[in-house]
């Protein structure tokens, strides 16, 4: 019985050299050209931030930077979405320095979902492997009946960050939804936030799988024009928590195009004049009174003596 030594077999290299020496052309490897420049992800978000029933910020940024090839839309508490995405962005930067490779979208998704669900005391770890080991240890502790102790301190949705993560890496475009309690979905299209139902209605009515050549972010006016702006309009005009402008982020293999304030949907309907001018007859006259004032006119005023 022979043993399989493994590794790469270079016997065919010798054969090819002998055939080439006898005048036969060397066999060529088949290559399949691939490009991901035509595939990408489009993220859209409104710019309204509210505090109760008050509009706190009319032009806030809800599309957050994660990596040069990854961006994330955040809904929920503004402080939670900004700090969670900033933390994961710094972790991915350190991971890139350690590995020397471009950040993967699934790595960002794993960091986000693990932070939102797992224990707060371990949220400072910047290693994806450490997160996986910790989750495995917690699963074993639950199986051994130590669920109460292992589950203490978990966020489980108390960090109000509902996220849509999009990006393009060497495996192609990716789109994930990440809920505040840590569950995730990989979907062809997704919506999150208070106006998500309105945007999803537009998605379900007009989305098609073969929209790459139709530039979907400009589909609203014509086949060459976008869907993402229309989705934002559906949320802005039908949800009180959404409003103001529309931001777009187009991520492809060729790069990122961030369109800040791409559309102004709710501009000022009235411009105040200064000073304020009222047209005659604007206010009704209820009572009119004319009084004559006496004016004293003194003639022959002597000039001042300037000789002394």
Image (cartoon, rainbow, N blue to C red):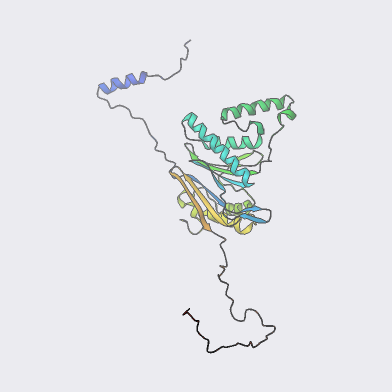
Residue at the (59%, 27%) spot, across then down: 130
Find residue 287 and report its horizontal and vertical position in percent. 69, 84
Furthest-bottom residue in this view: 299
Find residue 219 and report its horizontal and vertical position in percent. 50, 55
Find residue 106 and report its horizontal and vertical position in percent. 55, 36
Q: Is residue 233 above or below residue 27?
A: below
Residue at the (51%, 32%) spot, across then down: 94
Furthest-top residue in this view: 1
Residue 136 occupies which quadrant of the picture?
top right
Number of numbered discs? 0
Residue 173 visible here: no
Q: Is residue 269 above or below residue 59?
A: below
Find residue 176 and report its horizontal and vertical position in percent. 57, 41
Residue at the (67%, 27%) spot, across then down: 138
Q: Nearer the viewer, residue 85 or 107?
A: 85
Q: Nearer the viewer, residue 131 or 219?
A: 131
Residue 69 visible here: yes
Q: Nearer the viewer, residue 190 or 127?
A: 127
Furthest-front residue in this view: 308
């Amino acid at each position: 019985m022979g043993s399989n030594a493994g590794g790469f077999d270079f016997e065919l290299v010798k054969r090819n050299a002998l055939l080439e020496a006898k005048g036969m052309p060397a066999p060529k490897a088949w290559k399949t050209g691939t490009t991901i420049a035509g595939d990408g992800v489009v993220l859209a978000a409104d710019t309204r931030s509210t505090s109760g029933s008050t509009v706190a910020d009319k032009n806030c940024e809800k599309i957050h930077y994660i990596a040069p090839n990854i961006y994330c839309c955040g809904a929920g508490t503004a402080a939670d979405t900004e700090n969670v995405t900033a933390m994961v962005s710094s972790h991915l930067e350190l991971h890139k320095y350690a590995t020397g490779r471009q950040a993967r979208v699934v790595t960002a998704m794993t960091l986000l979902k693990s932070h939102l669900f797992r224990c707060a005391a371990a949220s400072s770890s910047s290693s994806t492997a450490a997160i996986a080991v910790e989750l495995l240890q917690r699963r074993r502790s639950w199986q051994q009946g130590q669920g109460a102790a292992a589950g203490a301190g978990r966020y489980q949705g108390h960090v109000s960050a509902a996220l849509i993560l999009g990006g393009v890496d060497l495996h192609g475009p990716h789109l994930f939804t990440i809920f505040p309690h840590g569950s995730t979905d990989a979907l062809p299209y997704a919506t999150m936030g208070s106006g998500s139902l309105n945007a999803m209605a537009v998605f379900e009515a007009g989305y098609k799988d073969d929209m790459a050549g139709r530039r979907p972010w400009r589909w609203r006016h014509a086949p060459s024009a976008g869907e993402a702006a229309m989705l934002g309009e559906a949320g802005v005009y039908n949800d009180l928590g959404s409003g103001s402008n529309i931001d777009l982020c187009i991520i492809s293999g060729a790069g990122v195009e961030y369109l800040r304030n791409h559309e102004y949907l709710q501009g000022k309907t009235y411009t105040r004049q200064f000073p304020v001018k009222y047209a005659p007859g604007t206010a009704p006259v209820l009572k009119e009174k004319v009084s004559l004032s006496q004016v004293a006119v003194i003639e022959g005023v002597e000039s001042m003596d300037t000789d002394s």
